[in-house]
Image (spheres, helix red, strand yellow):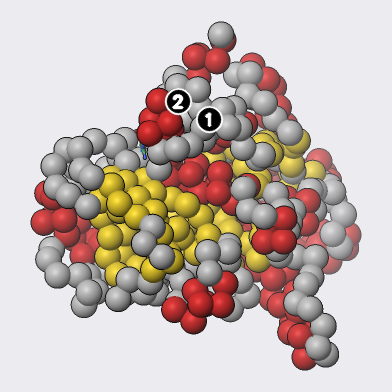
Amino acid sequence: MAIDLGETKSVVGRSLSDLEKHKERGTAYIGKIVMSSGERPVLGRKILMDIAKPHVILICGKRGGGKSYDIAVLLEEFARQPPTIRKRISVIAIDTVGIFWTLKFPNKEEKGELFNWDLTPDKTDARVLVPKGKLSFYKEKKIPVDGAFTIKVSELESEEWLALFGLTWKEPEGILLSRIIDEIKEKLGTLYDIPKIISVVEKDKDADKRVKEAVIGRLKVAKSWGLFEKEGTKIKDLAEPGKVTIIDVSAYRQAIGMEGTREIIVALLGKRLFEQRMLYRKEEEIKLIEGEKKTSDMPIVWMLIDEAHMFMPKDRESIALKVLLEWVRVGRQPGLSLVLATQRPNKLHPDSISQCDLFISHRMTSQPDIEAVSALRPSYMHQNFDKYYQEMPRSKGFALILDDNTENLWMVKIRPRFSWDGGVTASAFTE
Ligand SMILES: Nc1ncnc2c1ncn2[C@@H]1O[C@H](COP(=O)(O)OP(=O)(O)O)[C@@H](O)[C@H]1O
Ligand SMILES: [Mg+2]
């Protein structure tokens, strides 16, 4: 049955016992229920989504259906939590396109639509972090940036270097690079930079000259990405409690051969957050056992990934995939939540589909993609996905929500954003 908070609201993603205990605290207002058929349906109760407990949320729909918009709505809601909730949550959004910085500006364009929803345009308190060496890219594009980040060179294991350069253990370059990395780690521990690796390769006596040159060439390219440093940004500064942090990696979008950079960022971030949360989880447990309040420096973490098929592909190796699969499979215990958005569920690793407990789907038309999510079809779903998509209004922002927690299915309209939509042209800002 629907879990109701009076006549006007329902909560998805929250068990009945949690609902009784916490009411609507720690929820996100995401939209309203569709009450009638047709292109302009009557909208009913508000739909709130639990964000206080860990979830795996999959957002699907064809291009332009509203997936990135949904992520923005969620980010707005995270930023609007009361301080007691907010400081227990740390939110990171991976922005591959460079659209979420517009959260910082009020949505003047949809003022009318917001008014219909009894809402008003408002800016959102989010901070945008970009790779340090690419700051000029963002300045040129007039993207407001709050800070830069780098990755500590020693964080990369040889396996990750290989993934970054698309090398394998079978090639002489791969063999040399991993040998050098292991040697340096043993000698220097955790403090070295790329020029140091280059100099060790140069001095190497065993390797072939051509192979050395090839490896050095790659390392020089990696240096030019402006992403790696001897001392990198601390994970705590990236996943700061109470903050909504946008990691904008759009500078690496166009450039060929840089695909690996996005993956390495997500992989290392995901790996470190996982390790830290496991540690802190223990600390919290001990405090609880000793009768103290459950607090620690490292709050629960939400990572939102747009275009998730880039990071969790089903048909190729990806350094981020391994890490994210761990989040998906066992992340709930340490308090790690994932929001994955994709227009190609058919390209997504099947585990990220089967493990989601909340499924938000805009219209889909491609049969392979519909088939990919059909694996989800739970017992509380009474007809095929095709049928629901046919019934869904054509205009933007309508979605089907499957909620495993309450075993409910809803047709909803996602609410308009408070803040500017980066999906539309950014040139509108000149006024
Ligand atoms: N809930 C919504 N309400 C109003 N407009 C929406 C909504 N969702 C999407 N849109 C409109 O559709 C456009 C495309 O949405 P977007 O989220 O960028 O699509 P996707 O990420 O699925 O490709 C947005 O720029 C916005 O204008
Ligand atoms: Mg999008």
Q: Which residue is mark 2?
A: 111
Which residue is at a point 55% across and 15% down the rendered structure image? 429
- Indicate the amino acid at tag 2: Lys
In the picture of the structure, the residue carrying the numbered disc 1 is 121
Q: In the rendering, at what x and y percent does residue 51 appear?
A: 54, 62
Secondary-structure class at tag 2: helix
Say left or right for 1 vs 154: left
Q: In the picture, residue 360 is in which quadrant?
A: bottom left
Q: Position of residue 38 (x, y in %)?
A: 13, 42
Crowd class of label 2 (few under 14; some 14 to 19; many from 20; radius 10 Å)? some
Mark number displayed over residue 270: none
Tags 2 and 1 touching, CB below 8 Å: yes
187 in relation to 204, above or below: below
Rendered residue at 74%/43% (across/down): 150
| Mark toward the start of the polypeptide (2 vs 1) | 2
222 is higher (above) or lower (below) than 166: above
